Image: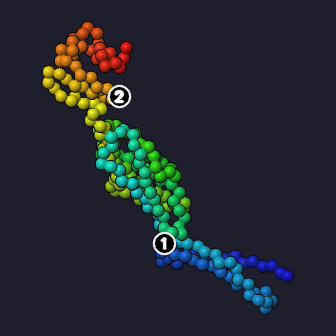
Amino acid sequence: MGEGYLTYTVRPNANSANGTVIDALASIIFDGQQTINTPLYTNTIDIAAPTSTMNALGATQTSTTFNISWTGTDDAGQSGIQGYDIYVSDNGGPYNIFLADTTNTTASFTGVNGHTYRFKSVAYDNLGFVQLLPANAQTTTTIQESPDRCQLLRTTSRLSIRLCGPQISQELHLEQILSLSNHRASPRRNWRKFAGLAS
């Protein structure tokens, strides 16, 4: 019995399209014996970057903390997505990295009430091909906390006031408001004592 081996190098055609499959198969013949075929070896041309996009957010968010998510794809048979960079713009400002080199597809984001946030995603694959940064936002949302969290309900001879934060409501006579604001001690502290927020 004998042994032998052969090594070779091939170069793909310059016009080969992304996803082109190149098969390699060899036949071995020893001393006129029956032909032995090697296993089929396959290479796939990968010359394209993956794609990704942010999942749509609602036009408004009622909390300063909310979830964002994104998805990405690479062509079938390609090297696959390795990770993502997520960008955010605050109130029309420049885009900055929010997450870099993440393999996750969701994250919690915390912003500021009244601000508008725009998001973009960029994917990159296992061969180092990187998606071009999208020119425009892929999703946009504005934080608008529920108005009843801080709201003057009516102005008559009596005032109904809802405090920001905990769901606490107090109705005061106008005279009580004036009395609190004219007190020698801190008006804010007196109001907090009246509302039961501080001792």
The residue that mark 1 highlights is 18
Q: Is residue 135 left or right of residue 130?
A: left
Residue 128 visible within the image: no
The quarter of the picture where the N terminus appears is bottom right
Residue at figure coordinates x 27%, y 33% from the top left: 148
Which of disc 1 and disc 2 is earlier in sequence?
1
**What's the distance in space between the residues labelled 2 and 1, CA to CA?**
58 Å
- From the viewer's perspective, is residue 196 above or below residue 119? above
Residue at figure coordinates x 47%, y 52% from the top left: 105
Which numbered circle lies on residue 85?
Answer: none
Q: Residue 165, position in %: x, y? A: 34, 29
Q: Residue 169, position in %: x, y? A: 28, 25
Q: Among all residues in the image, which is located at the extreme top?
A: 184
Task: Using a 10 Å C-alpha cutoff, classify the residue at mark 1 as few (fewer than 14 neighbours), some (14 to 19) or many (20 or more).
Answer: few
Q: Disc 2 on helix, strand or loop?
A: loop
Q: Identify the amino acid type marked 2.
A: Pro
Q: Residue 124, position in %: x, y? A: 49, 58
Q: Among all residues in the image, which is located at the extreme right?
A: 1
Q: Quadrant of residue 27?
A: bottom right
- From the viewer's perspective, is residue 61 above or below residue 173? below
Q: Quadrant of residue 91?
A: top left
Q: So how many labels did they put on this image?
A: 2
The residue that mark 2 highlights is 166
Q: Are marks 2 and 1 in contact (CB under 8 Å)?
A: no
